Structure formats: structure tokens, C-alpha cells
Image (cartoon, rainbow, N blue to C red):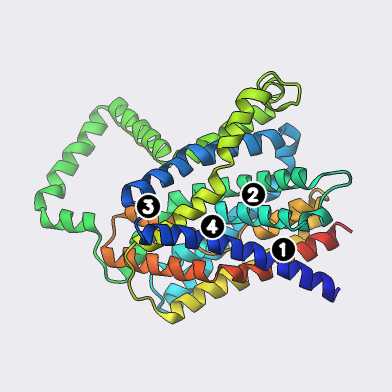
Amino acid sequence: MASYICETALAATQASISILLILLYGYLARRYRLVNAEGEANMSYLSVHIFLPALLVTQIGSQISAKKALEWWPFMVLAPAFIALSALFGWIGVKLFSLPGWVLPAATFPNVTSLHLLLTESLAATNMFEQLAQSGESTQDALARAQSYLLFNALIHNVARFAFGPWMIKKGAKDDGDSDVESEHSDADPEAQPDERSRFVDRLDRAVNPEKGLQSRFRSVWESIKAGMNAPLCAGLLAIVLGCIPPLNYVFFDDNGPLKPSLTQSIKKIGGLYTALQMFVLGAQLQSHPSTFVSALALSYLFLIRFVVIPALSITTVYFLSSHWQDDPIFNFVLMLGPTGPPAITLAAIVEMASVSKEEDGRVARMLAWSYAVTPAISGTVVSALWVAKKLGG
């Protein structure tokens, strides 16, 4: 038992350090101007809009089917549940302990994509997946299944992050006493605020022309849907369609399918570029964003939530509820790992979407830098999740 824990802990620590080193490479490349601002932005855009969608299509599409989609229901229940639970802990920190507003989104949205994908690759390289693989399954096949589960889980988290993240950042900035840029502009221009007369005329127009009002509502709903759509989400939905429709599944993903050796393999190779490149870009972003002082109490509370409380609750939940879904150690492992880890680096992009002050941007950047500096702390979660998954698998 002791030797198993030591061996697993060593493998998990090595996996975490390898991720930290990739971040460091990106940080140094940006610091010493091997990568400029334009190059950083271009790499980030390629990663999110081309490489990640390609990875989603090939990994999820090749693993999912109509039957498996129903078997993956625990992700659709547990992922939103832990997002809500994390938000609750963040809200408690802000309201009861008077922590900065950015603690709420930082506690709510973890890095569930690039970090976890690299972790599983490193674990597979150290043969840790052999103990979780099904009978006769190779390590690479086990890794492919794990990553398809991770990407499905990431889809749910990404929808919530980009839907609620900007609102949380804006609210946090206002709570901290920062003024929103758009609000400043609005306050400075009285004509930008509609007066009572214009609002009355608008209501009267909708009353006289109900069809116009209905069209306006439909247009508003459509604009909201378009705003929530992004390349990874579209790719994930496409992967589900291709995987769940048997003729399409055969054409694209079956070993005898006409397009698998050519089109599918080319997309898979592009998708394989995502994980390391994205972490490299994240390292560059940690260096390029301006940083501002953040309190040690806020960081300590955030790390407690992200590296201790949520992992403990996630592992405990899966341990007691695993009898209600498929008996698959890798499935259980990914369910436990899914909601854990440091805050998502895309919070930096969400800050830009929210148009808050440079001070708030700097605070989030400094928080992210410290969060990824302590990334090896996730080793404890990985060790515990591997041990519990193995025990549940018998």
C-alpha cells in the first residue's frame, strides 16, 4: 500500500512538474521576446479556434455513440453541480470574509481542458493508466477514452464560463470599487441614457405593433444564442452528431471507414497540437499581462477551495455514487478529476470581455500567476483519485 502511494505520488508529481515546465517555457519565450504580442495572440487564436475544435471532433466523435451518450449522464449532472458549488464557496468568501470580487469567478471556473489533458498524457507515459485500463485495452486506448471524457466535461464547463464569467468579473470589479469602462462612458454622456419619453414611445410602438415586438424578442434571443456560441462548443456538438449517427460514425471513425485514414487522421494530427501549445501560450500570457498586488488571504482561500475542498468533495461524491453508473475505473477517475485544478487561464480573456479597469485585469493576472506556480499541488488529488478509481474497479 505504502509503495503504491509513493509510486503514484511520484508519477503525479512528475506529471505536474512537466506541465509547470511547459508554462515556464512560454513565460521565458515571452519575457525574452522570442514571442511578441502578435505572435502570442495568433497562437492563442489558433489553439482555441482550430486545434481545440479538431481535438474535440476526433476524440469525442470517435468515442461517443447514442448509447454511450446516455451513459455519460453523470457529467451532465455533476459538472453543473460542482460549478454551482464552487460559485457558492466563492460567494461566501466575497460576502462573509470580504475577499476581492475576482475570487468568485476564480473559484468557480477551473482549468478543465489543457491542464487535465496534459496530466493524463503524463500519467499514461508513466504507465499509471495500466491499472485503470479495461481487460485487453492498451494504454493508448485507455488514454483516448480518458481524454474523450475530459473533453466532454470541458464542454459543459466552457459554456458556463463564457456565459457567466463576464458578469461575475464585472460584479466583482464593482464590489471592489472599480468602475466599469462602459459605465463611465455611459455616465459621461447623458444623451446615452434613454429618458422616460423615449421608453414610453418604445412601449407604445410595441403595443400598437405586436408583430414588431415579437420579432424584436426573437432577434434578441437569437443574438444571445449567437453570443454564446464559440468554436469549441460548435465542434463538440458536431462531434456528438458525427458519433451518434451510425452512418456518419462509420464514415469518419470506423477502422474500415473511407474517410478515417485521410480526413479524420489529418484532423486528429492537428488536434494533437493543442495541449502543449495551449499551455505554452498560457505561460506567455502570464508574463505579458500586467500584475497588481493581491492579498495573501484571498489567494489562500482560493487555493483551499480549488486544491482541497472541491477535490475532497468530488472524490467523496464519486465514491458513494459510483454504483449508479457504468463500472469503469477511467470514467470514475475523470469524474473525480473533472472539477478540480487551478483557475482557468481563460479568465484573462473574460476580463477583457468584461471591459473592467486595468487594476482588476492586473489582479486577475497576478492571481493566475500564483495559481499556476502551485500547480503541483494537484498531485494529491491525482493520487487520491487514482487510488479510489482502482478500488472501485475492484
- How many dots with numbers? 4
Q: Which badge, 4 or 1, comes first in the chain's sequence? A: 4
Quadrant of the rendering where the C terminus is positioned: bottom right
x and y percentages locating residue 83 in the rendered image: 55, 58
- Residue picked out by circle 4: 111
Residue 388 figure quarter: bottom right
Amino acid at dot 1: Thr
- Residue picked out by circle 3: 35
Q: Name the foreground residue: 235 vs 83.
A: 235
Does 299 sit left or right of 195 as displayed? right
> Spatial distance from mark 3 to mark 1, Cα to Cα?
43 Å
Q: Name the foreground residue: 124 vs 355.
A: 124
Name above or below for residue 285 compared with residue 68.
below
Q: Which badge, 2 or 1, comes first in the chain's sequence? A: 2
Amino acid at dot 3: Val
> Spatial distance from mark 2 to mark 3, Cα to Cα?
30 Å
Which numbered disc covers residue 150?
A: 2
Quadrant of the rendering where the N terminus is positioned: bottom right
